[in-house]
Amino acid sequence: MPSFRAPRGTRDLLPDVRARFGRLEGIARSLADRYGYREMEIPILEQAAVFERGIGEATDVVEKELFRLAPRTEEAESWALRPEATAGIVRAYVQHGMQTLPQPVKLSVLGPMFRYDRPQAGRYRQFWQWDAEAIGDPGPAVDAEVIEMGLRFYVEAGVSDVQVLVNSIGDSACRPAYLGQLKEYFGRHEAELADTDRQRLETNPLRLLDSKDPAMAALIAAAPKISECLCDACSNHFEALLAHLDAVGVPYRVEPTLVRGLDYYARTAFEYYRRGAEGQQQALGGGGRYDGLAELLGGRPTPAIGFALGLDRVLLALEEGGEVRTRPVAPLAVVVGADPADTVTRLRVASLLRAEGLAIRAELAPRKLGRQLEAASRDHAHFAVIIGDELADGHVQLKDLEAGTQRLVALEDLAKDLARAAKSHHHG
Ligand code: AMP
């Protein structure tokens, strides 16, 4: 017998956990509606170049973590599983000419993402995100709106004490000079850098600020700050963003070392952390402004901002806080019968009731009526529909399993009767 397991870093979401994900998805969809984001789907795989360009080749996500698919033929294009949704959404925005719609176009995607990372708690190879993007608005007001929507997600999900770390990373006018300062600074400390960080000094010096190496902490703390290099336009944008965040009561902290290390990112960068967990590697979510991305993917220059919130980490945070686990929904009624062999009638009656929108289980095991009723109680059903001799003149027994009472009901009235009962039981 083969013994198969879910691939390393992936997991089955069994019904209890799936229901908890479903609750989070419901909150995300409700927020998307309230804030005017329309849900869409993008493929789970894209041409690898969408990510190579759209995320950047000199990033961990593309360099090390991209799930590349083996081409099926020699000349086949190269595909990869999506490690995030932004690049795919912007690819779709460009492909479908959404520049011609009234701007901004606000889009939302919910679904699994894939990164070939070393699995550990809160870090999986398949994980779920809610992603929202406002494309075609230069901000800064929309930046605050996006950040506030993300925060509200945590509030409504029940994760307490989330705060936002926020920074501006400048734009193509002022960042080059800052990068020069960074290179110069870390160049002076090259001997203290690990090999990977020394490479980053060449390919992507901003990422040095992202280093999680504890030995780097002091060096990073003393590094030049982007805030001191912002041009007037970026500096005004950031000040206005903070004023908008103040106005909507978002708790934030300006974090000068928070960066997104890619050229097409501009200005606003933010991450959500639980208070006290800011030093840890694992943000609950994050996002930023990426004014250069549409152009990189073949579109017109288009300012845009968005976030990606990790659902798995929200569930972990809720578990730590002792979230009550979900239980299966009890059926309103179970259809049982005096004739153990007559599964045809039980299935037919159940089907009739389900067609009326009721949650019904049909007892399909050919066992004695007493056993069928026991199973109905175990299911926490409120009623048993008992099929017996009365069916000959169109009636069934309706037993209230909680009250222990029983009465005769005409089959044609049964659905209405149960629906009424469902209401008074807050059920179904
Ligand atoms: P990022 O695009 O890396 O900023 O990710 C955005 C959010 O997605 C993070 O804050 C996490 O909540 C979540 N996330 C990213 N990578 C993983 C992973 N490997 N496993 C679980 N959640 C992840």
Image: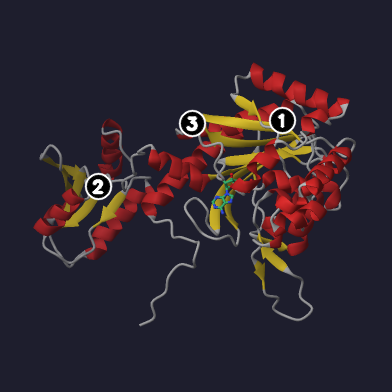
**Residue 326 lies in what quarter of the image?**
top left
Mark in the foreground, 2 or 1: 1
Q: Secondary structure at mark 3?
A: helix
**Residue 203 lies in what quarter of the image?**
bottom right
Residue occupying image coordinates x 14% and y 63%: 339
Which residue carries the number 2 mark?
Answer: 333
Q: Quadrant of the N terminus?
A: bottom left
Which residue carries the number 3 mark?
Answer: 156
**Residue 304: x, y in percent?**
77, 38
**Residue 307: x, y in percent?**
65, 40
**Residue 111: x, y in percent?**
57, 51
As drawn, is 416 to the left or to the right of 163? left
- The one nearer the camera, 160 or 13, is 160
Q: Secondary structure at mark 1?
A: helix
CA separation in Å, label 3 and label 1: 20 Å
Mark 2 Cα-neighbour bin, 10 Å: few <14, some 14–19, many ≥20? many
CA separation in Å, label 2 and label 1: 50 Å
As drawn, is 347 to the left or to the right of 88? left
**Residue 140: x, y in percent?**
76, 27
Q: Secondary structure at mark 2?
A: strand
Residue occupying image coordinates x 76% and y 75%: 76
Q: Amino acid at mark 2?
A: Ala
Q: Residue furthest top?
A: 247
- The one nearer the camera, 82 or 349, is 82
CA separation in Å, label 3 and label 2: 33 Å
Q: Counting residues from the N terminus, which is met first, the one under dot 2 or under dot 1?
A: 1
Q: Counting residues from the N terminus, which is met first, the one under dot 3 or under dot 2?
A: 3
Q: Amino acid at mark 3?
A: Glu
Residue 211 visible at all? yes
Residue occupying image coordinates x 59% and y 34%: 150
Q: Counting residues from the N terminus, which is met first, the one under dot 3 or under dot 1?
A: 1
Q: Quadrant of the C terminus?
A: top left
